[in-house]
Amino acid sequence: MNYYIYIMSNSSNTIIYIGFTNDLVRRVYEHKNELVDGFSKKFHTHKLVHFEIYSTAYDAIAREKQLKKWTREKKNSLIEKDNPEWIDLWDRINNFEKL
C-alpha cells in the first residue's frame, strides 16, 4: 500500500492545504467536490499542485508535519520545482492510480 502527502491550492494560488492519505484519487475528489467540511471547503482549495508517494504511513506523516512547518516561500519553491505553472495534477493522478 502507498501513502501520500499532497498540496492543494485555490484557483489564485494564494491559499494552500497540505494533507496525508492512503487513497490520493479519493481524497482529491473529496476536496474538489467539497465533500468534507473544514479548511479546504472553506477556502476552496480544489487544485492538486504537488504530491509525494511513500511506502509507509510513518514516513508520509513525518513529511506532512515537516512541510506544515515550512515557510510559505519554501512550500512555493517545492511546488514550483516540479510544477512551475501550478497546474492541476488531477488528470495525472487519475491515470496514475489506474495503472
Image (cartoon, grey):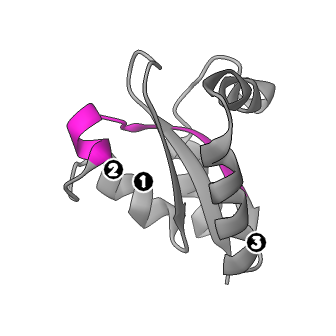
| Residue occupying image coordinates x 47% and y 20% | 13
Q: Are marks 2 and 1 in contact (CB under 8 Å)?
A: yes
The residues bearing labels 2 and 1 have C-alpha atoms spaced at a distance of: 5 Å
Task: Please provide percent x and percent y for residue 64.
Answer: 64, 57
Residue named by callout 2: 31
| Residue occupying image coordinates x 60% and y 46% | 68
Residue named by callout 1: 28
Residue named by callout 3: 59
Along the viewing direction, whichever of 83 and 44 lies nearer the viewer: 44
The residues bearing labels 3 and 2 have C-alpha atoms spaced at a distance of: 23 Å
Task: Please provide percent x and percent y for residue 35.
Answer: 20, 57
Question: Count the marks: how many?
Answer: 3
Along the viewing direction, whichever of 99 and 7 lies nearer the viewer: 7
Q: Which quadrant of the figure has residue 78?
A: top right
The residues bearing labels 1 and 3 have C-alpha atoms spaced at a distance of: 20 Å
Q: Is residue 26 above or below residue 52?
A: below
The kind of residue tagged 3 is Asp
Tell me where the magenta segment starts and ends, as one range.
Answer: 39-52
The kind of residue tagged 2 is His
* Label 1, residues with CA under 10 Å away: few <14, some 14-19, many ≥20: many
| Residue occupying image coordinates x 32% and y 44% | 40
Q: Is residue 6 above or below residue 1?
A: above
Nearer to us of marks 3 and 2 is 3
| Left or right position of 23 against 76 | left
The kind of residue tagged 1 is Val
Helix, strand or loop under label 2: helix
- Residue with the most extreme bottom position: 1
Task: Please provide percent x and percent y for residue 90.
Answer: 50, 44
Which badge, 1 or 3, is on the more N-terminal residue? Answer: 1
